[in-house]
């Protein structure tokens, strides 16, 4: 059975683009990506831990108004 693993920032941004997000754009302290009128802040660390990744995926799920499964995330 698969499980969540840390994710490089570059891979995270790539997966968001595949989900329909645009960017990243420069903001005040952090870069951000957009999906329609929604804005998602992208932390500047090079790699995201599993808890940080899960928190950001939950934000993405709220923006997209659907669940993102582990299988879907790993296949992006």
Image (spheres, rainbow, N blue to C red):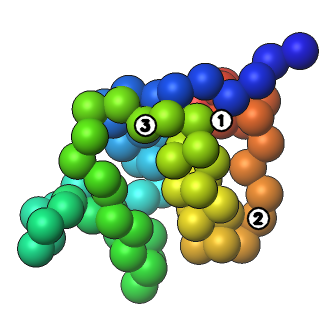
Labels 2 and 3: the sequence-earlier one: 3
Q: CA distance from mark 1 to mark 2?
A: 13 Å
Indicate whether 71 appears above or below 2: below
Relative to the observer, which residue lies in front, 29 or 31? 29
* Identity of the residue drawn at 76% across and 24% down: 3
Estimate the x, y position of residue 13 in percent, counting from the top left: 36, 42
SS at badge 1:
helix
Quadrant position of the C terminus in the picture? top right
SS at badge 2:
loop
SS at badge 3:
strand
The part of the image, by quadrant, that contains residue 33 is bottom left
Could you say which disc has been placed on residue 62 in the image? none
Q: Which dot, 2 or 3, sits closer to the camera?
A: 3
Quadrant position of the N terminus in the picture? top right
* Identity of the residue drawn at 23% across and 55% down: 24
* Identity of the residue drawn at 26% across and 40% down: 45
Relative to the observer, which residue lies in front, 15 or 5? 5
* Horizontal relation, residue 44 to residue 7: left or right: left
Estimate the x, y position of residue 4 in percent, counting from the top left: 68, 29
Could you say which disc has been placed on residue 73 in the image? 1
**Mark 1 nearby-residue class (10 Å; few <14, some 14–19, many ≥20):** some
Indicate whether 44 appears above or below 49: below
Estimate the x, y position of residue 74 in percent, counting from the top left: 65, 26
The part of the image, by quadrant, that contains residue 42 is bottom left
For mark 3, what is the residue? 48
């Amino acid at each position: 059975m698969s499980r969540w693993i840390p994710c490089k920032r570059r891979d995270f941004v790539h997966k968001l683009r595949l989900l329909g997000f645009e960017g990243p754009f420069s903001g005040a302290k952090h870069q951000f990506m957009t999906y329609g009128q929604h804005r998602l802040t992208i932390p500047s660390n090079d790699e995201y831990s599993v808890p940080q990744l899960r928190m950001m995926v939950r934000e993405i799920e709220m923006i997209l108004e659907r669940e993102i499964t582990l299988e879907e995330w790993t296949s992006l």
